[in-house]
Amino acid sequence: MVEGGYPAFPSVLDINQIRNILPHRFPFLLVDRVIEYNPGVSAVAIKNVTINDNFFPGHFPERPIMPGVLMVEAMAQVGGLVMLQPEVGGSRENFFFAGIDKVRFRKPVIAGDTLVMRMTLIKLQKRFGIAKMEGKAYVGGEVVCEGEFLMATGSGGE
């Protein structure tokens, strides 16, 4: 019985809890559920990619592929969930996506996929308000996107 063979992803943070942490809203909130959470250290979250996502009509009409920049944005949002914690010093008012390095797209992500994103803090310079994170996104256990992310607390950034 195939329909009974796939357990649901655990829900450590649901969409309402995510909305309490991140300032993003439709159509730009790209995280549906957090399945593993270690505030200030790491998080694993999912985005259910559906044909109803608003970018598919234009990217591309005949071959719906999730834009790479939106994968990167979704991963940055997961990074926000990691860093927007009192013990790390992040707040919604002064948290910015400051840069990306070494980003690679390994496979296309299409409608029907579940994007599983892991963001891990690798360096925090509190004095300068800079966090460096490593991100990897998977579909079915295969890496589809990876890179290094810089986050900043303070003024400036995106």
Image (cartoon, rainbow, N blue to C red):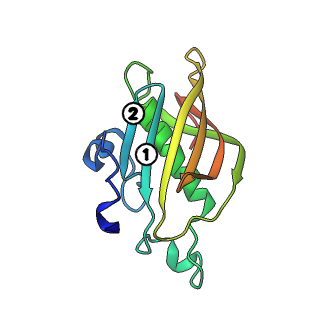
Q: Quadrant of the N terminus?
A: bottom left
In the picture provided, is 140 more to the left or to the right than 37? right
Numbered tag placed on residue 126 in the rendering: none
Q: Which residue is at the far left?
A: 16
Residue 90 on image: x %, y %: 44, 27
What residue do we see at 29% from left, 41% from top? Answer: 20
Q: Residue at x 44, y 75 (%)?
A: 51
Q: Earlier in the sequence, mark 2 or mark 1?
A: 2
Determine whether 149 is above or below 127 in the image: below
Q: Nearer the viewer, residue 151 or 63?
A: 63
Q: Name the spot of residue 41 as percent of width and height, x first.
A: 48, 26
- Residue 135, quarter of picture: top right
Q: Secondary structure at mark 2?
A: strand
Residue under the point 58% across and 51% down: 72
Q: Which residue is mark 2?
A: 37
Which residue in the structure is indicated by mark 1? 45
The location of residue 132, given as percent across then percent down, is 62, 29
- Give the residue type at disc 2: Tyr
In whole angstroms, how far apart are the C-alphas of marks 2 and 1?
8 Å
| Residue type marked 1 | Ala
